[in-house]
Image (cartoon, helix red, strand yellow):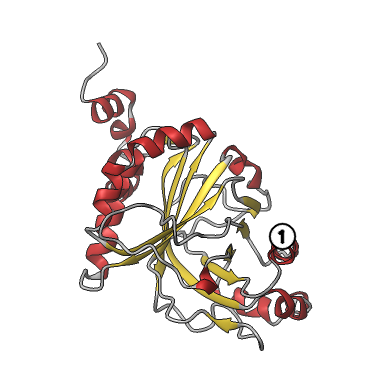
Amino acid sequence: MPRMPVAENYAERDGTIAINSYTTVLRRPRVPHELFATYWRDVHGPLCSRIPGLGWYVQNHFNREQDAHLWPAIEGIAPFADYELDGGVEIGFASAAEQERFNAACPILFADEQNMFAATVAYALPEGSRTLVDRMPDPAPNGDDGLDRIHVHFGAGDVDPAAFATFMRGFAETLAAEPAVLKTRLHQPTRYDNAKPAPPAPEVDHLVPPERTLLAILELAFESPMARRRFYASQAFRATVAQQQAHIRHVAAFAVSGVYTYVRDSRLTVAGLRGSRPAQLIERLGAANQVAADVWQLLHTGALHR
């Protein structure tokens, strides 16, 4: 059942994520999508969740075949060429020291990427990301909440980087002020450097073409695809088109099929402890014993309380 949004804005709860990263992921071409998604959620996800120092870990799975109107075609703004993705990942930290702890332990995680990913690109957000509005009460979603969620990637191209960054901040604020937009979260990573591929996972591609070195990413949510299409036709959105044309050179939009939260505020969620699908089963059956302190202790440490 959809978890419907409310009037309250929960954006401030994301402020504990001081340092963030946004990683684009593309599955290996001969790995079936369902196998890929299951492995990512229930094998790779719990492994990543246990890396020390982690303060925030969310998988956003993308649906390549939802519809063809995720973002309006605007004259002068070209689609990114050959840009297909299967997801976007946020990995965040409460401090630089915690990030260093995570980085030191990451080889065990990166060694797993080759099992399912053809390409991953980690865009650094040393000053974190910004949630301007979030009307969903659940701080740690684990699945499809029935809302229309999209990630839109914008490329600066030959635009002045500072002007691009300033425009994107103002654009995000404009969208967040509109009642139809239920969530607006902005990622403005530093320019990606192909000479320093990230993450350093073996047998996985980490290179990007020039037009994807400087991105801004908007996470948006609407009540439905119809609400989204109506918003794009609104005067409020049309009034932004000229400025979009002046400051954006490339764009790609991706439909979100599910949001899976494994670590929130430096604490494992049930999905982080057990895997995403087991966590859904536990919630659906109301298996309260499975989230009791003694079970949590046993599964997390291998020992019961004495």
Q: Position of residue 289 (x, y in %)?
A: 29, 31
* Horizontal side, residue 261 vs residue 7: left or right: left
Quarter of the image for the N terminus: give it: bottom left
Residue at which label 1 appears: 169
| Percent of width and height locating residue 291 | 33, 33
Q: Callout 1, which amino acid?
A: Arg
Which residue reaches farthest bottom? 75
Crowding near the residue tagged with mark 1, few <14, some 14–19, many ≥20 C-alpha atoms within 10 Å: some
Decide: is 271 above or below 231.
Answer: above
Residue at 67% of width from left, 76% of height from top? 231
Q: For the image shown, how many numbered marks are present on the structure?
A: 1
Q: Residue furthest front?
A: 195
Relative to 17, does residue 170 appear above or below in the rendering?
A: below
Give how far across and how far down residue 303 sits, in percent: 21, 21
Q: Look at 22% across and 70% down and name the residue there.
A: 32
Q: Secondary structure at mark 1?
A: helix
Image quadrant in which you'd find residue 60: bottom left
Q: Residue at x 61, y 41 (%)?
A: 13
